Image (tube, grey):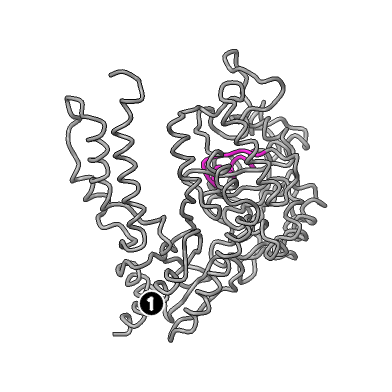
């Protein structure tokens, strides 16, 4: 096989045809997959074939095998978990990223992707109102974004206590105390475990998941030694925000580093209407979010921002003879855990270039307005209770008893017209809606209300 463009032509054409057919099916296909992973795996189980197969035929076979097991996450009727769709410019840019096949680790080796990611990072800082001289990295998602931010925090607070964790490790050093609101996301726990910092101390939160300032003040008073405070921009269930300015002030007064887990909610800072709910967020020391949530770029693409680059570089820089340096500039790999990585920031550049500032504001405001409309209309259905104050893009519903809520959730998912996820919040089972997809429109809202209404009536019979 030669390595010229003709070798790719037919396979890429088939891929385009299958991709366009998949996207064209979004308005009408059932949202959920039609086959389980076990059944699908059993249907394709075979020994590794002995002989090659034409690449175009491989693409056809792949599309045929996968189709019944695909979740219509790009659909405007998908309200499960917190997953956005994909903007057209971002999807096309991601195709180019795969075709270019750049290891976007070093500026000198891949200057195109490095420059595009650096511009995307500068635009993000501008949009979110974060310090313009901050370091921006593009890890896989909010979990790794939290890991990077918290690694920088670990380095900084231990260095301030006279311990170089990056050179000497944790053993023998001062214990780092991490404080987080009682309703913080599990991704924070995962990141902290990876960093050897253990489970954070839970600080009491109110009924919407917002950290209580009196409890935070007391918790900080009880800390002896280096401290990190984790705040959240967007509670998983209520969508609400910790009181940033006051909480950050309390933490900084005690010398603590503040990291903001803003997986989906940090994007509210881009909206002049919603930004007051995040007042003071720019005073923190690090922030993590997901571009594949509210911004709607393809998986995977997290964003991490660290106010002072030095602790991030202390945690993630590597120096060897074969790594080519571009003067004194930091390389992309020094801001994420991977030395080999795709150019995740390029679809972010494409999304922001396509939307512009006004488009981002409109997107964020529309997602929040859709959540408010859904909560209002669903709350008017008989037997439906909206449990949260709809602060951003999340809606939690109860249908009376936990048993009935679980049954309604089962019926909504089985119906297939929409997808919403079950959860448990504040001691109650809930049906949770997340409005994250750029393409969700009035018809999708009507479909969602009708689907919940059918499930509710069905649960009564």
- Residue at figure coordinates x 68%, y 47% from the top left: 177
Residue placed most toward the observer, 98 or 161:
98
- Residue 424: x and y in percent read 47, 67
Q: Is residue 375 magenta?
A: no
Q: Can you name the residue that lies furthest to the top here?
A: 321
Q: Is residue 135 above or below residue 383?
A: above
Where is the N terminus found, in terms of image quarters?
top left
Magenta: main secondary structure equals helix
Label 1: few (<14), some or many (≥20) within 10 Å?
Answer: some
- Residue 255: x and y in percent read 79, 47
Q: Can you name the residue that lies furthest to the right here?
A: 253
Where is the C terminus found, in terms of image quarters?
bottom left
Residue highlighted by disc 1: 450
Task: Using the rendered view, name the quadrant where residue 138 is placed.
Answer: top right
Per the image, label 1 sits on a secondary structure element best described as helix
- Residue at figure coordinates x 64%, y 19% from the top left: 325
Residue placed most toward the observer, 341 or 191:
341
| Left or right: 188 as drawn, with respect to 410 | right
- Residue 9: x and y in percent read 32, 31
- Residue at figure coordinates x 68%, y 30% from the top left: 314
Q: Is residue 367 above or below residue 301?
A: below
- Residue 315: x and y in percent read 64, 32
Q: Is residue 431 above or below residue 14?
A: below
Instruction: Look at the image and give the residue range highlighted in magenta.
Output: 136-151
- Residue at figure coordinates x 73%, y 59% from the top left: 244
> How many numbered marks, from 0 up?
1
| Left or right: 292 as drawn, with respect to 399 | right
Residue placed most toward the observer, 232 or 264:
264
């Amino acid at each position: 096989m030669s390595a010229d463009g003709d070798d790719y032509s037919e396979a890429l054409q088939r891929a385009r045809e299958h991709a366009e057919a998949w996207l064209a099916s979004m308005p009408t296909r059932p949202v959920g997959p039609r086959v389980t992973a076990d059944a699908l795996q059993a249907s394709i189980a075979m020994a590794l074939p002995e002989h090659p197969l034409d690449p175009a035929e491989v693409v056809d076979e792949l599309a045929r095998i996968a189709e019944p097991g695909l979740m219509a996450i790009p659909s405007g009727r998908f309200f499960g978990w917190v997953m956005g769709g994909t903007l057209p410019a971002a999807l096309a840019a991601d195709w180019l990223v795969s075709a270019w096949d750049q290891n976007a680790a070093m500026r000198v080796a891949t200057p195109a992707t490095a420059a595009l990611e650096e511009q995307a990072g500068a635009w993000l800082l501008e949009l979110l109102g974060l310090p313009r001289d901050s370091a921006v990295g593009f890890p896989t998602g909010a979990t790794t974004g939290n890991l990077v931010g918290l690694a920088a925090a670990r380095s900084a607070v231990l260095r301030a206590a006279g311990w170089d964790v990056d050179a000497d490790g944790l053993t023998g050093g001062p214990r780092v105390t991490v404080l987080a609101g009682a309703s913080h996301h599990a991704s924070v726990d995962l990141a902290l475990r990876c960093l050897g910092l253990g489970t954070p101390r839970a600080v009491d939160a109110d009924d919407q998941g917002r950290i209580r300032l009196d409890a935070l003040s007391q918790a900080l008073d009880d800390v002896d030694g280096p401290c990190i405070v984790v705040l959240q921009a967007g509670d998983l269930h209520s969508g609400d925000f910790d009181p940033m300015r006051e909480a950050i002030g309390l933490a900084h007064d005690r010398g603590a580093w503040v990291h903001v887990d803003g997986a989906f909610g940090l994007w509210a800072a881009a909206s002049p209407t919603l930004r007051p709910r995040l007042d003071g967020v720019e005073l923190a020391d690090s922030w993590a979010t997901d571009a594949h949530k509210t911004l709607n770029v393809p998986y995977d693409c997290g964003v991490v921002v660290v106010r002072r680059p030095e602790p991030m570089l202390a945690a993630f820089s590597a120096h060897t003879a074969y790594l080519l340096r571009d003067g004194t500039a930091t390389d992309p790999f020094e801001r994420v855990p991977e030395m080999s990585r795709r150019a995740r920031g390029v679809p972010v550049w494409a999304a922001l270039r396509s939307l512009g500032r006004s488009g981002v504001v409109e997107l964020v405001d529309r997602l929040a307005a859709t959540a408010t409309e859904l909560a209002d209309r669903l709350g008017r259905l008989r037997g439906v209770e909206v449990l949260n104050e709809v602060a951003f893009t999340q809606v939690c519903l109860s249908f009376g008893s936990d048993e009935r809520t679980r049954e309604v959730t089962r019926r909504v998912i089985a119906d297939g017209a929409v997808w919403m996820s079950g959860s448990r919040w504040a001691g109650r089972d809930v049906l949770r809606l997340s409005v994250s997809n750029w393409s969700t429109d009035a018809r999708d809202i009507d479909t969602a209300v009708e689907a919940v209404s059918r499930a509710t009536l069905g649960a009564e019979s």
